[in-house]
Image (cartoon, rainbow, N blue to C red):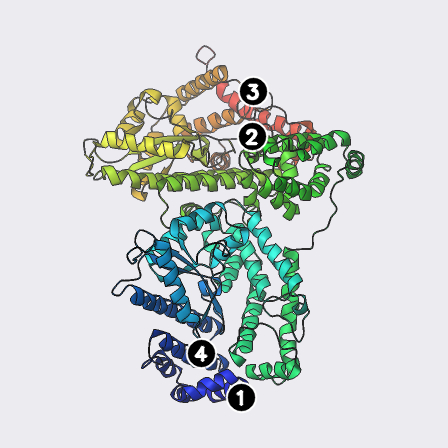
Amino acid sequence: MDWDGALARAERFSPFLEMMSGRYPDIAARLRAGEDEAAWSLAARAGEGASGPAQALRRRRGAVALVTAVADLAGAWDFERVTRTLSDFADEAVEAALMAAFAERYPGEEPRGFAVIALGKHGSRELNYSSDIDPILIFDPETLPRRAREEPVEAAVRLGRRMSEILSARDGDGYVFRVDLRLRPSPEATPIALPVEAAISYYESMALGWEQAAFIRSRVCGGDRRLGDYFLQAIRPFVWRRSLDFGAIDAILDISRRIRDHYASGQAFGPGYDLKRGRGGIREVEFFAQVHQLIHGGRQPDLRAGATRDALRGLGEAGVIGGDVARRLDEAYVLFRTIEHRLQMVDDRQTHELPADDAALANVARLHGLETSGALLDLLHPHVTWVGNNYDRLAPEKEDGRLSVEPDGLVGQLAAMGFAEAEAAATRIGRWRAGSARALRSASAREALEELLPGLFAGLAKAPDPMAALNRLDHMIDRLPSAINFFKLLAARPALVTMLVTILSHAPVLADALARRAELLDGLIDASALEPIPDLDTLVAWLKRGEQGDDYQLLLDRVRQKVGERRFALGAQIVCGAADPLEVGRGYGRLAYGAVEVLGQATVEEFEKIHGTVAGGELVIVALGRLGGGVLTHASDLDLIYLFTGHYETESDGAKPLGATQYFNRLSQRVGNALSVSTASGPLYEVDTRLRPFGAQGLLAASLDSFSRYQQDNAWTWEHLALTRARPIFGSAAGRAAVQQVIDRVLAIPRDPLDLARQAVKMRAMIATHKPAAGALDVKLASGGLVDLEFLVQVTQLANQTAVDPDLGRSIDVLAGAGLLDAGLKAAHDLLTRYLVVSRLVSPGSAEPPEATRALVAARCGARDWHGLLAMLDEARQSVAASWGAVAASVPTEEA
């Protein structure tokens, strides 16, 4: 590292740094020798002997600027260390100035009841060499010290003014920081310091979109940190909204367009180019990151980094933006900011423009270590061009292309798009324009609708049944409480319009869900939305991830929101052909396992706060039926059994002790409520516990010992058949293993094959009587359907004491491999299951799908067309019916 050369460049090409070098010769000598740590120690003491805090800070600031600049020019400190160092000094300066202001007005008082919130580059610890700082000042009227007959707001304003004066006043030693207080709400009408509750109220109800983006880069930098943290925690929902807020995003994009228009002279690259505001400059890197943070950060807390580089890195790692895009933006950002620093080093002036004069531009180039102004322009140009082109894709110029407001013209446009019933479609648009729905009564909502209409109706025109899709859309809009963000999201994401049209055309279940929660569509913009559900550990970590300070009720809401989004996305995967329905069914299953794990654990922890723990005992939850098998549909219930280990006479050790039986029954009820009760975020799952010992007459939670005795001494054969699909899904590894041992022991009981078949056939006949098939396409209950297949597999498993696996597909593979079942039954199982999963979305009543949807159903099930699918289903059911019929035939008629 050329420390001597760096100092020489600083002294030759920067009048400001030359002056600082002369003012602090000891520091300059240390820097020339490459002793940056020693130089920094001297800079920290540069204020010693000053006449007061203000002068001490000004002297320190000049020394800090010298050390940081030369270490930067020498390449000893990277960009991040430079900006962090400048930002940390700003924190020290703010704290010192506030302490001095307090000491002057309230001697002996700590700076309580008054907090300084850093925004902008100070908030994200990315300060320039010559930056303003943009704080917001808040105070607590209850705890802020004040003089007699002094109102709290007067006291706070005087403190704020004095702090600002200490930081920004100039003398022969320069200044510390320029302070800009105009980022507070309504700066033309409000005092410079705001009561904390009034500030919270403003940001919760009246703040503008750009203010939401500004608080991405916010933190407490001085004063009463408890007060500052309280404020930032309170407004967090304003900044990070789970439902996509296009108002904030539009505000950022609008600011960008205004900047380009207002600073037109600095847009063209070359001498005079504005590195901060120019097309392809610093702001466009920052805005690009912030727009994506606002889109995804409400649901992904890992993306909420304040620093631009950290934000880009997180967005790239999460797959929100491409890894190459993140890397190139980061490289450009570091280069732009570095050259911006060179511009500001020259005269310690807050400038962002490349000098228009060639000699001045060459001076900046040489300060950076380049020979000519042309070399500097060549270094910047490719990055500026790429960043500008990349940003243009985010904020393209809007085209008019709207649908006509004249009835005849509108009908003609819709007919040209392909609407066979163009007049009926035009009438529907007319109703919307007239504000027929609650969500369309505001002018802003109707304006958002107008932007969307061309792309939306172009997509609807391509639907198999455009009017049916339009009718569902109309019904959905009628039920929306607000439509602005929904319309803006679709207008900004044409691919989502296609997906929405597909959902409206074919999936009433998903369309109804959208009508209840339009923000579900937001979830489809995440990179992972159309990917498989991850492994259970990753899923559980994602479901648990929340915010510091979240309580149990917030967790219940958050899990419902996340599960709802992923269930909706899984349904969309099926309808849009992005995944095999069988894999989606497994995804539904893992999602349910994750919800049981997270909500079960949280409920146990809440319960233990009051009732303590039961020594040697714990709750274990067992899944049965489709949940035990791990493959669910969109509408599946959760079949659960609650068990507890340990002795039933043990008492818990909490403030309100309970006996073990009462303890675990209450706890089980709480867990069931956590999984099923509707909260502000809606319902989660229906829970069915009727398969527990003694059914509805039995205790909700049974001890493991009593469960074991019941299964061996009292259970019906059909209960043992059901137990073949049992899977412990909640509890410690030891607790689950203990339950599994009991299940394995029960299933290993020797049985008379004929009696087993007789009992199974009898049970199947009862089901057929009390719960008949809804029609020929009820692949679950109809003859040769999945229920027959389950009975067939279970009887074969128990009769032969082999292949007992809750996963029906795996069991069939093993039994077929052993020659105990027809090998073709695995294909029958897969086809029937695929059809069941798809049909629950497109024809939930098990009726024949609408004609327009049949081709889609056939394709998702692997058939060429609808008639081909019917033939495949008929063949599969005949195969199952023949094998199950052989079991039924083995039972004498009079016994069956």
Label 1, on which residue? Answer: 12
Left or right of residue 740: residue 515: right
Residue 803 in percent (x, y) is at 43, 35
Few, some or many residues within 10 Å of mark 4 (<14, 14–19, 20+): some
Task: Specify the label residue 51 is tagged with.
Answer: none
Label 2, on which residue? Answer: 840
Few, some or many residues within 10 Å of mark 1 (<14, 14–19, 20+): some
Q: How many marks?
A: 4
Q: CA distance from mark 3 to mark 4?
A: 85 Å
Instruction: Compare marks 3 and 4 and give the one earlier in the sequence.
Output: 4
Q: CA distance from mark 3 to mark 1?
A: 89 Å
Label 3, on which residue? Answer: 774
User: Secondary structure beneath disc 2?
Assistant: helix
User: Secondary structure beneath disc 1?
Assistant: helix
- Amino acid type at image mark 4: Gly
Label 4, on which residue? Answer: 174
Q: Nearer the viewer, mark 1 or mark 2?
A: 1
| 56 shown above or below 812 | below
- Amino acid type at image mark 3: Ala
Instruction: Compare marks 3 and 2 and give the one earlier in the sequence.
Output: 3
Residue 869 in percent (x, y) is at 65, 30
User: Secondary structure beneath disc 3?
Assistant: loop
Residue 844 in percent (x, y) is at 57, 27
Q: CA distance from mark 1 to mark 2?
A: 76 Å
* Contact between labelled residues 4 and 3, with CB atoms less than 8 Å apart: no
Q: Nearer the viewer, mark 4 or mark 2?
A: 4
Q: Residue at x 24, y 38 (%)?
A: 610
